[in-house]
Image (cartoon, rainbow, N blue to C red):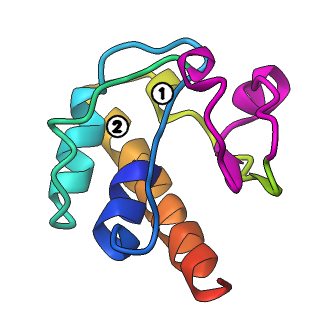
């Protein structure tokens, strides 16, 4: 979701990559939640953080504690930001309950991405 927001709001200013520690499919509830705010992430693909090693990134942003603890070290990173957000994929309950969690995290990520852009 963070990649979607950053591409949508400032893709002309940043080359955006996103990757996970344990990559899997993009969660359909994330696609639904982002579509509700006019951002289509249905074409995004999950990649392993390790697959990006060797590339230079001025910023690395981790969005949950697990990612922060297990994120590989990217040489040359100028700024590492950590946003300790709940992993919405771990939400339990009905689809409606889980979608509510995805919406809340989507909104938190959106606010953080907007603040990130405004500060730079």
Q: Is residue 116 above or below residue 25?
A: below
Q: Position of residue 19 (x, y in %)?
A: 51, 29
Label 1, label 2: how many angstroms apart (C-alpha)?
Answer: 8 Å
Mark 2, other Cα within 10 Å: few <14 / some 14–19 / many ≥20: few
Q: Is residue 30 left or right of residue 87?
A: left
Q: Is residue 77 left or right of residue 104?
A: right
Q: Residue at x 39, y 13 (%)?
A: 24
Q: Which residue is mark 2?
A: 97
Nearer to the camera, 36 or 119 = 119
Residue range (magenta):
49-76
Please identify the quarter of the rendering in which residue 39 is found: bottom left
Residue 89 visible from this viewpoint: yes
Q: Residue at x 25, y 50 (%)?
A: 33
Mark 1, other Cα within 10 Å: few <14 / some 14–19 / many ≥20: some
Local secondary structure at mark 2:
helix
Taking the magenta stretch, the answer to whether it contains residue 30 is no
Q: Which residue is mark 1?
A: 91
């Amino acid at each position: 979701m963070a990649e979607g927001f950053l591409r949508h709001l400032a893709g002309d200013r940043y080359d955006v990559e996103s990757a996970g520690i344990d990559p899997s499919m993009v969660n359909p509830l994330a696609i639904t939640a982002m579509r509700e705010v006019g951002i289509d992430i249905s074409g995004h693909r999950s990649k392993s953080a390790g697959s990006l090693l060797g590339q230079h990134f001025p910023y690395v942003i981790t969005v949950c504690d697990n990612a922060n603890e297990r994120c590989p070290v990217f040489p040359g990173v100028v700024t590492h930001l950590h946003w300790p957000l709940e992993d919405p994929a771990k939400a339990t309950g009905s689809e409606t309950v889980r979608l509510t969690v995805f919406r809340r995290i989507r909104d938190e990520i959106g606010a953080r991405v907007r603040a990130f852009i405004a500060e730079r």
